[in-house]
Amino acid sequence: MDKRRNSSLNKIENSKMIKANPIEVDRDKGDFHYNTDYEFDAGVGLSEDVVKYISDVKSEDSWVKDFRLKALKTFEKKPMPTHWATKDLENINFDIIRYYLSKGQMPSRTWEEVPDDIKKTFERLGIPEQERKFLAGVEAQFDSEAAYSRMKDDLSDKGVIFVGSTEGLKEYPEIFKKWFGKVIPTSDNKFSALNSAVFSGGSFIYIPPGVKLEQPLQAYFRINAENFGQFERTLIIADEGSEITYMEGCTAPKFETSTLHSAVVELVAMKGAKIQYVTVQNWSNNVFNLVTKRAMAHEESEVRWIDCNIGSRLTMKYPGVVLRGRKARGEVLSIALANDGQHQDTGAKMVHAADETTSNVISKSVSIGEGRSTYRGLVQMPGHLKHCKNNTECDALLINSDSQTDTYPAITVQGDDHTVQHEASVSKVSAEQIFYMQQRGLSEADAMSLCVNGFVNDLIREFPMEYSVELKRLIDLEMEGSVG
Amino acid sequence: MISEKLNSEIDSNINLSSKEFFEKFSSKHSWEPGWLADSRKDSWERLQSANQVSVKDERWRFSPKSRFGYTNFNQIAEAQHSIKFNGVTEESGITVDSIDSILLEQPDVLTDFVNSSGPNLGATESFQLINSYFNNGLFIKVDKNQSQALNLTVDHYCPAVNQATFHRNFIILGDFTELTIIENFTSKDTQSSGALSNLTNFILGKGAKLRRVLIQNLGNGSSFHNLENFILNADSSVVNVECYLGGSQSRIETKGNLTGKGANFENYSFVSGKNEQLFDQRTEQHHIAPHCSSNLLSKNVLQEEAKSIFAGLIRVDKEAQQTNALQTNRNLVLTKEAEADSLPGLEILANDVKCTHGATTSRLDQEELFYLLSRGIDKKTAESLISLGFLEEIISKIPKEETSTKVRDIVSSHFNKS
């Protein structure tokens, strides 16, 4: 009896303890920066010399250099996509951005070797703790290059490769060259071309056949310098029957001037492989976040993009899956929170290119204050295929009278053997729900926050535990002061 | 004298938008009042500058724009007999006439309306061409508080090969008036491949009620442009039913502007397409005032190599709180070669609203088909029965039994083995 009571008391104690030490995350957590001296600096503005400088610093093979220079030409040729996208893009001044900044070329393998100022940054963001707690491998990118990269030893024994882009192309060209720039060609859009010209950092991952990672690999992206452009490049190849979960987080300090983040992420899921890609984007409100993400899904493979956008000034990101093999499955789950001064322009692309492929898109957005959220979708099913299915749901919640939301899906279906359904709804938090809760003693703000959490709850559950707790708190904080 | 003016047919091998053509047209229409000549000239000039812009236009996404051009047409059909009224009542306070005779007899009634804006959903060329060259159309004006509900049927005729007809229509309902109008668009013979471009402004006063049915059953090969702009003042209501059955290519632009509190806009349309027919439909429900509701339903049944594009937008302005807006697109694709594109859109700036849109595309329900086949009904008939059932939701909104029966017959005939 006594024992039992003790244990239940302990439980209470424990829960109190947890309450006393709430998880230390908030929107402002990333808002600090240390002055750092960079050993490598490509200067301000974009030119052929800058591209050559980056390539030389990395002592890349000539084919990579040619790839970059060609991409620069494509970038210069391509117009801004303002005929459909927001005019805010015109505020990006490519001439004042610094395209490459780094302290060293090789990431440290142990935490102790990481330079002090960078270490301070990541410790403050809690990276080493998280690694010890639940990650199979971590890479931490500070401006242009990874400062720290480590993976559990047993994984490298199994043949898992987890390196940066430079190392990946140099050391393992036989694996990565085949797919590099193939899922997302340089000329896909203006920003993928820009990334192809000046990319640096990011993760190149290869999972050998049949290897299933039980713990996620994580990358952490940090912008430290003002007027800086971060252009990481990620390529994940999951070989036959393998499984991987990859997570990325991003923060930057708040600067007066705008900062550019333009990544290219390519995923390749071979036969029967599963890739889950989780993003928690929490850039500060001066960051233009223009990212191209696409996956190639082969036979019976499954790709899931789980995408959460809370930060940035303007995010334009439409993760896509090209369903190239029979019975492949693609999924995009997306949460966007747009607060004052933010525009979350997100969405999904599902290109069906084989029989019996299925895709699912669920997008939820919340616009608070003067925030604006946009969903853009694309679903394509050509007539020669059989039994393709797509389901799209997008729901938007508007909190204040200045909030804005848009939905622009584009669906093309050919042939008599497909099923597509799309549904979108826009509403505000129902007055009855708020009234019900207020009647039971909750303040209006608490009630509102509860409703919003309920609205995104079923999606948040899809995130790994650690993230879902964080996200709920983030949403609470974002909501603060938005009511009344 | 009249016939001289009416036979303004212009024969030449030049482009409709060329200066030469326009000048010839103007000289033949020199008897028109100066303000109209100016308005035509303005439109023609805007057409020139619009033709120079060549950026990609989202409003033409998925559309093979070249099929909607006017390059195959080098004549404007004569106005005579391009429009016919049935059921006109002579009463004070009601004006029902063709633009053709309005231009001759009392052109000044048009001054207030001739510069009304179109739906502006992409078909700039058609809009400017209609405004430059219109020589017929319908003009209906009901003065306010006219208690008697008006019932009308109008036929528009599409001309023959190489000819284009430009109809400019005005339907102006005063406060608290009612109108039911059925508009038929047909070709004089089934193989005529002319172009019929139709631009209509609907202006509804307070509490006015409009029920309108449009049936487009043009001959093979013809081009149809239908631009319509509805302005709904407080508590007015529109129920618009459109049936698209014929023609080779149709570009449809429908815009409902809910400018007064409590207005209600309902737009139901369907397409039954076969061969290589193309139906490109763009709609917008623009909520400007609060407490309005709108409902839009677009259904497409596609056989053979037919293609449909549905692009709809619900736009809710910041002031339009308490909006209730709905938009639904359902596509039934019956063959491998048919294609249905859907671009439903929402742009919401007010927060206290209920807005939803849904789009689905699929084939026939296989169980329903099996059920019918197992009872000895052949496949074509079964397909036609299920398709008719699918479209019944819209056909049943047609207020006149006679008309809805006719529409059902035409849809059924699309499934005849031939």
Image (tube, rainbow, N blue to C red):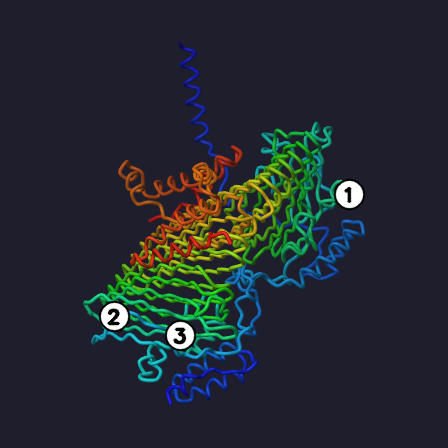
Query: In front: A203, or B409?
Result: B409
Quadrant (top left, top right, bottom left, bottom right) of the N terminus of chain A: top left
Label 2 neighbour load within 10 Å: few <14, some 14-19, many 20+: many
Residue A278 in view: no
Q: Position of residue B141 (x, y in %)?
A: 28, 73
| The label number, if any, that marks residue B174 in the structure image | 2
Q: Quadrant of residue B66?
A: bottom right
Disc 1 target residue? A173
Q: Amino acid at mark 3?
A: Ser
Q: Amino acid at mark 2?
A: Gly
Tell if the residue under mark 1 belongs to the same chain as the one under mark 2. no
Q: Position of residue A156 (x, y in %)?
A: 72, 31
| The label number, if any, that marks residue B82 in the structure image | 3
Of marks 3 and 1, the one in the foreground: 3
Q: Position of residue A463 (x, y in %)?
A: 52, 36
Q: Residue furthest top?
A: A1
Q: Quadrant of residue A176?
A: top right
Name the subunit of mark 2.
B
Secondary structure at badge 2 equals loop
Q: Amino acid at mark 1?
A: Pro
What residue is at 31 percent from the left and 69 percent from the top?
B203
